[in-house]
Image (cartoon, rainbow, N blue to C red):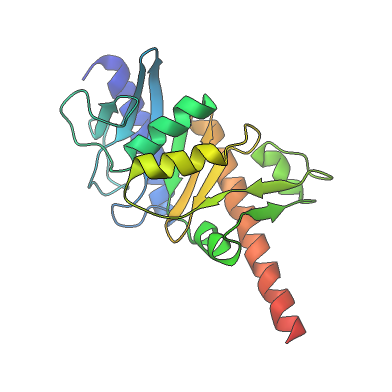
C-alpha cells in the first residue's frame, strides 16, 4: 500500500469504529469508501469480513470504477455500488451502514421517504422549511450493477442518500466528515418520521 492509501485506510478505520460503537455496523456489516483519484476513478474501500470496530489502516482495498480490486485485496461486496455513487454524484466519500431507522423507514414508505419542515434537514444539506425532501428507496439484491442502475434512475444531486429496502442506507459527501454529519442527521430524521407515523396509526385506531 502507498502512503496515501494507508492514510485513507486510517480514516476509514476511525470512522468505522465510530459507527460500530453506535450500533450501526454490527458484526462485520457495513462499509465505507473514500475517493483516491478521479481519472481514472479509484476508491479506497474497507476490506470485506472485518469487525468494523477493530479495523486498522491496512484493512482497506483500492478498487476501480466497477468496484473490482486493483491491488489484489478483497473489498466489500458492495464496492461496486460505492463506485457508482461516487461516479454519478461526484462525492468524495460514501458511507454505508445498517442502522435500524433507515430500514424501518424504507419498509414503511417503499416508494420514498418524504421529509419536510424539520430543523435537522439543514444538517442534511436541505432547507428546514418549505423544502420537500424525498429519500429514494430501492429494492435489495446482490448484483451491484442492478442496484447501481436503480440508484442512478432515482438520483437527485440535492439528495445525498439512498435507502436499500431491508438492508441499510448509503449517504455521501465531499469527505468522510460531511458524509458522517449527513448520516447522523438523516438517521435522526428517519427515527422521527417512523416514530411519529406509528403515533398517528396508534392514535387513529
Q: Determine the residue positioned at 74% across, 75% down.
A: 200
Q: Quadrant of the C terminus?
A: bottom right
Q: Nearer the viewer, residue 130 or 23?
A: 130
Residue 131 position by quadrant: top right
Q: Nearer the viewer, residue 67 or 56?
A: 67
Q: Quadrant of the N terminus?
A: top left
Which residue in the rendered view is the most extreme toward the bottom? 205
Q: From this viewpoint, is residue 174 visible?
A: no
x then y, percent, for residue 22:
45, 54
x then y, percent, for residue 12:
37, 34
Residue 77 position by quadrant: top left
Q: Determine the residue positioned at 71% across, 52% down.
A: 115
Count of number-bearing discs:
0
Q: From this viewpoint, is residue 84 visible?
A: yes
205 with respect to 10 (left or right): right
x then y, percent, for residue 88:
50, 28
Q: Determine the residue positioned at 77% across, 39% down.
A: 127
Amino acid at each position: 500500500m502507498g502512503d496515501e492509501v494507508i492514510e485513507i485506510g486510517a480514516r476509514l478505520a476511525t470512522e468505522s469504529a465510530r459507527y460500530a460503537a453506535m450500533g450501526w455496523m454490527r458484526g462485520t456489516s457495513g462499509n465505507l469508501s473514500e475517493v483516491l483519484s478521479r481519472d481514472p476513478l479509484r476508491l479506497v474501500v474497507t476490506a470485506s469480513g472485518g469487525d468494523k470496530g477493530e479495523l486498522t489502516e491496512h484493512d482497506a482495498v483500492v478498487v476501480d470504477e466497477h468496484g473490482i480490486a486493483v491491488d489484489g485485496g478483497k473489498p466489500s461486496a458492495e464496492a461496486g455500488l460505492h463506485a457508482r455513487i461516487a461516479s454519478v454524484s461526484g462525492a468524495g466519500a460514501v458511507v454505508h451502514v445498517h442502522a435500524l431507522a433507515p430500514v424501518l423507514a424504507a419498509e414503511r414508505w417503499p416508494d420514498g421517504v418524504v421529509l419536510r419542515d424539520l430543523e435537522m434537514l439543514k444538517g442534511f444539506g436541505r432547507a428546514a422549511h418549505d423544502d420537500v425532501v424525498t429519500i429514494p428507496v430501492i429494492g435489495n439484491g446482490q448484483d451491484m450493477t442492478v442496484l447501481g442502475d436503480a440508484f442512478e434512475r432515482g438520483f437527485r444531486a440535492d439528495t445525498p442518500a439512498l435507502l436499500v429496502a431491508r438492508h441499510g442506507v448509503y449517504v455521501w459527501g465531499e469527505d468522510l466528515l460531511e458524509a458522517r454529519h449527513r448520516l447522523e442527521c438523516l438517521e435522526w430524521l428517519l427515527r422521527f418520521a417512523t416514530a411519529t407515523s406509528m403515533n398517528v396509526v396508534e392514535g387513529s385506531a
